[in-house]
Amino acid sequence: MSRVSVEQQTVCLPSAPHVDHQHPDRTPRPNSVQTYVPHAYQETRAGHVLEKAELTRPRFQQMNMKEMTVKTEETSASFTLHSKPTRSKRQRLSSVASAIRKRSENRLSFKAPQRPPLSREPPIWATSRQEICETLDYFRSYQSGVYSSDGLVKGYLLSAFGSERDIFHLGGRFIVSHGGGKSESVLQSRVGARHQLAGDQKITDRSVRALMRNYEESRPLVLLADDKYDKFPYDLSTPGSVYPYIVLGFFWIPYAWAEYEAPSTDNQSVVRWKFAFQWCEEQGDPWWTSSPYADEAGATNSVSNFLHHNEKPSSTIVSPGKRFRFRDEELCIDCMKTSPSVYKQGWICLNPCCGAFWTLKHGGSPTILDYSESFLQLISPTHPNISLANLKPSLISEAPDGIATGLPFSKGWHCKGCGRLACRSDWKCWKCPHCNKEHQVEDRSMAPHEFWLQRPSRPIMHAEIGRYSGIRSERPAIIHSTIDGRDEAIHRLTYVLPMNRGKIHLVLGNPRANSRANEAFRLYQEEAKSGGLELRRYALRTHRLRGPMLTNYFSQNSGEPYQYVSGTGQTVPFDKASKSVIAALAIIKERTQKALGCEVPFNEILTAAYMESQKMSFHSDSEIGLGPVVASLSLGSMAYMHFRMKNSQQREKRSSQIDLTLTLRHGDVVVMEGAQVQDLYEHTVSPVNFRIAATARCIGPNHSYYKT
Ligand SMILES: O=C(O)CCC(=O)C(=O)O
Ligand SMILES: [Fe+2]
């Protein structure tokens, strides 16, 4: 072993990589400074590059083969050999020198290419991750770049932090990317952005495993790209032509292999799985390569045709033409597994479990690698009988049973006018935020008795008290009242928080006492449909995703302004409030008065409307200046309301235990009594199906709204 010092660092340079065949995991991997020049010299830590002129043979010889000074762009580095190198070492040194030089040249000559803007609107595009996930069945992953379902990848997002040799080749018909997470990334957290270093990808990792299944079974998947993916030939964020997310189309995976790769900031190489994606020719030409006027010119073989007109799945298969060839692979005699022939520099075993992984046939780890000519050619498709579905989500034109609050109706939509994907943000209709196109579906109102017949997944219990919650229930009370000349008897259940910190009352509705609740429910549906009550999903103020993130329910605020979701600008004062809100307020006031024995001067109502599968996440109604009583009326479907302690330390110990669950049914009113109910606890509501809730509060002069 020879010792070479580079600046202040000293590293050992093995003459050949030691491969532990018994324990491949222990085979030394190239460390950061050796990654691409693993058996000889290092680049300086900051990635300084060597100047071409400094690494010439005469200079090398002049140093008596014992010392060599090389200058980088910003500093100079001194390489000292402690013994005169042998001939073979000299050869290695010069090959390393040329490798460094080549890399240096690449870096010196690299300028982020100016890309032109797209000259046409993409057939499918979006501005936020939520728009994609709520609209497309083939990409529903909010965090990861790989979306899989049933062990197969449906959608794959090309984004920033590409890896070495990622390519967008043949106009995008042949793309290489690294799959499966653990790549270098920026994580958004409560405390800000954090740089996440890359780690080894394993074949057992969920995403890699799923991509491998697509590869093995030749299952096509959909590639998407965002504006941070710099291999796409068009700039997706040029002013006037901003498309943060685009759908490229169907691809299949002709090659999958593993490499060692040096992350730019880490000090250790990592195993990275690479996948080649080949355009599915059934789609015609990629839409970004076809002219913007191709549709009008009557082109029959463009993906825009496929995307626009192909309502039925296509089963046309392109027969292997002469530009296709067959897969080129070689068998490794160490692991008896085949690896594809990827590189110009020769075949390498690309199985990371093999002792010979990442070792050239004639020994040594690869330094600079390039793809071979043959690898870069399209290969003959191996998915003969798989038909591709239409990538454009279809528009719902009618509600089959007249009910338009089911899951498909809360999903986003694809605007046929401009290609934009958008969340459903208005209750009244779908609206395109780009071209303002609207789409509405005729439906009917639901009657409360339809929900009384609802069969819940678990037995209905009015309340479940957590074992260690310290909450106790009071003896149920029957409250009598006379409404519209009729006697009503209703039950009140009361739950007392530990140390008498507050009470939660559940005033039960029932079919005999629900006439006003029924009317409020009818009015709500009517006004929501006509737009008399503007129910909308508002953007959350804090979240960790890209683009706006809307609440998972629709809401409207009446009375005094309330900050919680909509901000204060959208509030309708009580004297202009819709009939439904006024009807709900009357019920809440009356029931609360009966429950507490005193009147509460509610001056604000937040109406929340939930379609199937929507919910309100954990929160507390604890804005500064809110009165100590909060009461809410439930209409429509049954729902579960869970309470838990806010203190996260306590919660962790008790593994996010729920302290109290109330089952809310049509006509029920929950009254939260005492400021500490909000200060110490938080609550969430999960409706079983379509539901409307009206929550009333007292907003005092100390409320943050009055202070601003
Ligand atoms: O949907 C519900 O019943 C509760 C709504 C709620 O918690 C709120 O508006 O703060
Ligand atoms: Fe709440």
Image (spheres, rainbow, N blue to C red):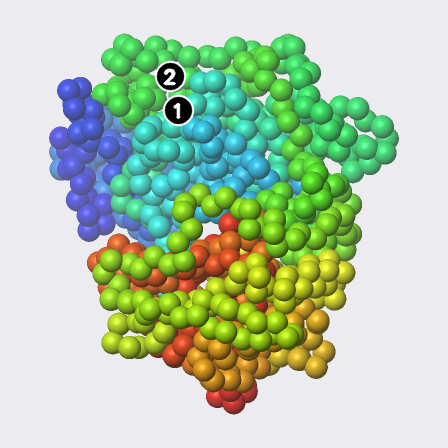
Q: Is the C-beta separation of discs 2 and 1 under 8 Å? A: yes
Residue at 15% x, 20% y: name it.
22
Q: Residues within 10 Å of mark 2 (few under 14, many from 20)?
A: many
Q: Secondary structure at mark 1?
A: strand
Closer to the chain start, of discs 2 and 1, is 1
Taking the image as drawn, is residue 319 in sight? yes
Residue 705 badge: none
Q: Amino acid at mark 1?
A: Trp
The image shows residue 460 at horizontal and vertical percentages of: 42, 51
Displayed quadrant of residue 694? bottom right
The image shows residue 16 at horizontal and vertical percentages of: 20, 24
The image shows residue 546 at horizontal and vertical percentages of: 52, 55
Compared to 573, does 146 lie above or below?
above
Compared to 308, does 601 lie above or below?
below
Left or right: 290 in relation to 185: right
Left or right: 608 in relation to 270: right
Residue at 59% x, 40% y: name it.
136
Residue at 44% x, 43% y: name it.
457
* Nearer to me, 547 or 53: 547
Compared to 18, does 424 lie above or below?
below
* Nearer to me, 94 or 446: 446
Residue at mark 2:
339
On-image quarter of the N terminus: top left
Residue at 34% x, 10% y: name it.
331
Displayed quadrant of residue 181? top left
